[in-house]
Amino acid sequence: MERGRAAAATGPAVTLAIVLSCTGAWAAAANSCPEVQVVGLEGSDKLSILRDCPGLPGAAGPKGDAGVNGERAPRTCKELLTRGHFLSGWYAVYLPDCRPLSTLCDMDTDGGGWTVSVGTGDRPAVHGGTNELRVDLMDLEGNRQFAKYSSFKMAGEAEKYRLVLGAFAGGSDSLSNHNNLAFSTKDQDNDSVPEKCAERHSGAWWYYQCHLSNLNGLYLRGSHETFANGINWKSGKGYNYSDKVSEMKVRPV
Ligand SMILES: [Ca+2]
């Protein structure tokens, strides 16, 4: 997936999908309603009104595709894979409130079932439980590198989306040194130097002073003379080479 990008300025979009049933919400709301009130109309009692309740459901919509008997909506790419979806691409996965979320699934790499982060400043949508992390990089010639970590999550807003990274588990590591650091953006300077790493390096990342990796850096298409402001991975092609493709992807363990 090729991404033309501008400098990352947005905060991280974190979606925490917790294991919840996708049924029962309507029933709970209905049970809390007051009783049906029958109100007379000009001496007649034919008009029934539901007071202080949600309106009645509308007419049924068109019939959807048949579901799989006894299975709830898929919440992760890994669940889709186990249900026989072997092709990489965009799928609907479902949030705890049953809303569908269009999600890019990598069903090919390293066993498949990876939920891929897309978009500047976004980090992977993390589902409840432990998720492993994989970073895949590709240069302009199609050479690939990767890094894998036993677990990944981002702390909440109160902790400035601190990186909580598990053990390095293979490939080429340029992220472990960023563990436990807060996320910095152009507008949120949470690094450990007086200047703003996010501005200096044109990205949004878990900077300290400032980085060994910068996957939200500028899309500079290969070698660049400017220092460390591209899509850089220090242990890969270094501070003066911007990879063509960078993907962060998570998979439930
Ligand atoms: Ca600073």
Image: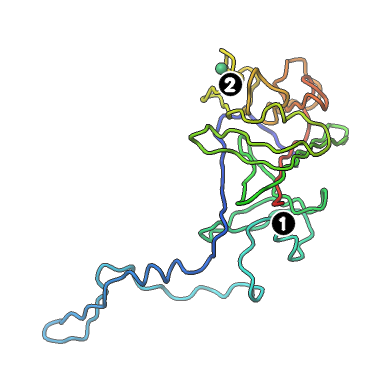
SS for callout 1: helix
In the image, the residue with mark 2 has its CB under 8 Å from the nearest atom of ligand 1: yes
Residue 81 or 130: which is nearer the viewer? 130
- Point out the residue furthest to the front here: 167
Q: Percent x, y for residue 243?
A: 78, 30
Q: Amino acid at mark 1?
A: Lys
The residue closer to the viewer here, 223 or 234, is 234
Tell me the residue at 67%/73% (across/down): 68
In the rendered image, the vertical position of residue 24 relative to residue 219, given as above or below = below
Residue 52: image location, x then y, percent: 26, 67
Disc 2 residue type (three-letter)? Asp
Left or right, 160 with respect to 71, comes to left
> Which mark is on residue 78?
1
Determine crowd level at label 2: few under 14, some 14-19, many 20+ residues with C-alpha closer than 10 A.
many
Residue 30 in percent (x, y) is at 37, 71
Q: Position of residue 11 (x, y in %)?
A: 54, 34
Q: Residue furthest top?
A: 194
Q: Is residue 90 left or right of residue 36?
A: right
Image quadrant assignment for residue 239: top right
Q: Quadrant of residue 168?
A: top right
Q: Label 2: state its secondary structure.
A: loop
Disc 2 target residue = 191
